[in-house]
Image: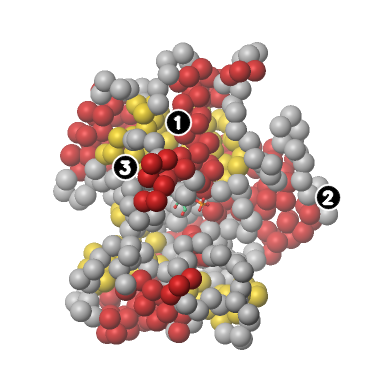
Amino acid sequence: MTSPVWHPFTQHGLQEPVPTVIRAEGALLHCADGSTLIDAISSWWVTTHGHCHPRITAAIAAQAQKLDQVIFAGYTHEPAEEVARGLIAIAPSGLSHVFFSDSGSTSVEVALKMALGYWHNRKQPRHRILVLEHSYHGDTIGAMSVGERGVFNRPYAPLLFDVGTIPFPVEGQEQATLDALESACRGEQKPAAFIVEPLILGAGGMLIYGAGILRAMREICASHDVLFIADEVMTGWGRTGTLFACEQAGISPDIMCLSKGLTGGSVPLAVTLASTPIFEAHYSTDRAELFYHSSSYTANPIACAAAAANLAIWREEDVLGRIASLSAAMAARRAGLGKDQAFEKSRQIGAIAAIDMKTANAGYLSELAPQLRTFFLERGILLRPLGNTIYVMPPYAITEDAVDIIFSAIAEAAQAFAL
Ligand code: PLP
């Protein structure tokens, strides 16, 4: 019988295999047919420490027996309070308030609404948002609007709002990015905010840029009174080698989005952190000025308990040390690949490595992507190339042997798919 399930980002017409996963631990997924897969992309970039981390699963189980869910408008609970306090203690300075939601996309929607609400309540309405070329911020309408226009959102284009696009800071041409941002900030239509993925653009193709540019972009926004939104949904929780990518640039955004690894990747939760001025612009005795955003499950206690356990792991264990070792192991294996003529643009930041396979048909719709997916699946590896870009972003608990298997399979792919 065919399944009634409609999967995300899946062309069912291609009839690709859909493994049924029944159990997971560390970096391994166990399937119903008895096979085991190495999760080389952290199940869409969420699993940080490893699947089914015992401290996180125990926290979820304990919380589920105490308080499963409660309305969060006008009510609170200790897991949410604990997460909020824990986040403010480790977030870039100046971020003082925590707004909960359920996914990376909703954390971005919240960030955009906070920015517009800030200007509205200050009686200086601004609506224009600046974005970086090739960005991806999620799949809801606002998040798509601030992302790259293309195959991901073409059918919905008429619903998307207009934005100002700043060119990606290609190495050697960074000044053009800074000049374009400066000019957009000075523009007649004053921008409300600039939203960026710090240090690396994920779904846009794992495009890396320097911390100096991130810092310069933040400074330009500050000097023109344009709010700076850091979308750390992918980069947060150690992926780039530091807890948050913003740390490498020594910057504090006005608004910061987190999700994915917030619960260690166990259950869905997101937060949007805001600076005091953003909160205060909504603080009043006038109910018309409150922040009008909610969802039924805002700050679900079970998800918050998972996030609190994740924060405790970060406080008490040497997670950054683990990431540094993983990063070094990945860099060593990647160095071998870089010499292969089939590849170009080998790159890495922290525990994210990427390489492009040379092809006549680059881009997300490259026919290489589904072929490579199947090739890796047949070798017991979950990899999901972005077009002709193969990237590796494993859970930090992955073993060196598993890292070897992944990079050997990528080397083998070079032979199988070389032009
Ligand atoms: N922002 C960034 C930078 C992302 O990489 C993603 C997802 O990959 C999102 C936002 C959207 O997150 P979600 O898929 O949880 O809605």
The residue carrying mark 1 is 254
Tag 2's secondary structure? loop
Question: Rounded to the nearest whole Å, what is the CA distance between mark 3 and mark 1?
Answer: 17 Å
Query: Residue 247: image x %, image y %?
Result: 42, 43
**Nearer the observer, 261 or 126:** 126
Query: To which residue does mark 3 refer?
Result: 132
Q: Earlier in the sequence, mark 3 or mark 2?
A: 2
Q: Looking at the rendering, in which quadrant would you find the N terminus? A: bottom right
Q: Quadrant of residue 284?
A: top right
Q: Which mark is residue 16?
A: none
Label 3 to label 2: alpha-carbon separation: 44 Å
Q: Quadrant of the C terminus?
A: bottom left
- Asked if one can make out residue 127 in the rendered structure from this viewpoint, the answer is yes
Q: Residue at x 29, y 45 (%)?
A: 133
Residue 60 position in % (x across, y down): 73, 56
The residue labelled by disc 2 is: 66
Q: Are marks 2 and 1 in contact (CB under 8 Å)?
A: no
Mark 2 vs mark 1, CA separation in Å:
35 Å
First of labels 2, 1 by sequence position? 2
- Between disc 3 and disc 1, whose residue precedes? 3
295 left or right, relative to 340:
right
Q: Hey, what amino acid is under mark 3?
A: Leu
Between disc 3 and disc 2, the foreground one is 3
Look at 46% across and 62% down and name the residue there.
9
* In the image, farthest residue toward the right: 66
Give the residue type at disc 1: Asp
Residue 231: image location, x then y, percent:
44, 43
